[in-house]
Image: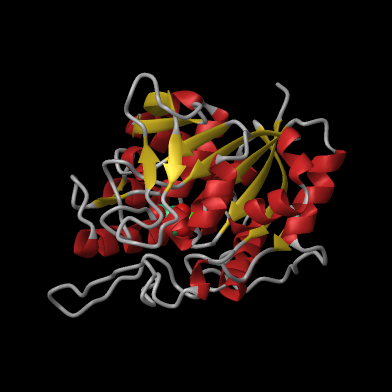
Amino acid sequence: MEKKKVILDVDTGSDDAVAILCALAAPELDVLGICTVAGNKGLDFTTDNTLRVVDLAKSNVPVYRGCREPMVCTLNKNRHGGFDGHRTRKDENGNEAEYHKDHLDIPAATSTIQPEHAVFYYIDTLMKSEGDITLIPVGPLTNIAMAMRIEPEICKKIKEIVLMGGGCRQTNCSPAAEFNIWIDPEAAKIVMDSGVPVTIVPLDATHKACTTAEEAQEMRSWGTKVGTAVAELVDERILAYRLAQPMENLYSAPIHDALAVCAVIDRSVLKDVVHTHVDIDIGGGLSDGQTVVDPRYYPDEPINCYFAFNADRDKFNKMMMDYLRTYKD
Ligand code: RIB
Ligand code: CA
């Protein structure tokens, strides 16, 4: 089986961590590099967390630090009102669960980042490539958009972008937007207008693929460092979601980013996929960062992506757990 060449772009983050572990374990993928970006946390935290995960996986995949700020949206101080996009709440006992901690509860990293900036790593790697690399961004799209702006020729060299982000009937950080897009709407628009084949794995799909407390307990039962670490992350996410964004099963939570990775390996984990036009609201108003999905059979604008409105929960979670189970201490 020929491995698919991929580059991950992450804002690690609890679900990013699971996505990285799945990608590094998957025999179907050749992870060429992992790029970090500010998003869930500041760049230094997301980069440190990424190194921690790569070390936990006993991998030597190179990590490249990327952009510390979104392209332009923070220049307008009124645009996001200082809100960081992550709402958490306290439970009846005053416990406050976070979706993402500054430092993941896994051992400090011993590996270090590569000297090249992620944006130039993308340009160098893609321009030298045979056009056979898939990008899997699961955080804000700042790095990829900046690379496209600096060297537009890379758009002809990207095989596909499979991104976790956006939402049509599901949002999270505002009534209209999903976090990865909302943090850097201009970057998302550059990617959507680039002409590169794009598959969007949005909240409409990830919220239908939630991982349960029972599945977390099964991971813990393996007695491995990876199993235990991911079980802890999932349990923390379940509490945070139960308090702030309750899912249909109150004792489950979406592991958004891992679904994007599994979709690159087996597209059938995505369901109700439409081929349509998606634009990004960069107007800075109430719907800033919205992924505007054209529902019409004949959109006005050229079709530019596949958008998944559903997912196969059981197939996805089986894939994820099968990959995680392969890690031995
Ligand atoms: O909205 C969910 C996305 O935002 C996930 O990628 C999560 O890690 C956060 O980055
Ligand atoms: Ca993420």
Position of residue 99 relative to residue 138, above or below, is below
Q: Answer with left or right where residue 206 lies relative to residue 59.
A: left
Q: Quadrant of residue 272?
A: top left
- In the figure, residue 91 lies in which quadrant? bottom left
Instruction: Tell me the residue at 34%/48% (across/down).
Output: 254
Q: Residue at x 60, y 63 (%)?
A: 37
Which quadrant holds the N terminus?
A: top right
Could you say where residue 117 lies in the image, as x and y percent from the top left? 77, 63
Residue nearer the viewer, 260 or 150: 150
Residue 185: % across, % down: 48, 56
Q: Residue at x 64, y 41 (%)?
A: 135
Whether residue 107 appears in this view of the structure is yes
Residue 51 placement (x, y as % from top left): 65, 65
> Which quadrant of the figure has residue 134?
top right
Query: Looking at the image, can residue 326 be seen?
Result: no
Q: Is residue 70 left or right of residue 130?
A: left
Instruction: Check the image and report above or below for 319 versus 65.
Output: above
In depth, the one of 203 and 214 nearer the eye is 203
Is residue 288 depicted above or below 194 in this figure?
A: below
Residue furthest out toward the left:
92
Q: Residue at x 75, y 30 (%)?
A: 132
Quadrant in the picture for the C terminus? bottom right
Q: Where is residue 194? Give x, y as percent.
A: 62, 39
**Figure label count:** 0
Query: 321 or 309: which is nearer to us?
Result: 309
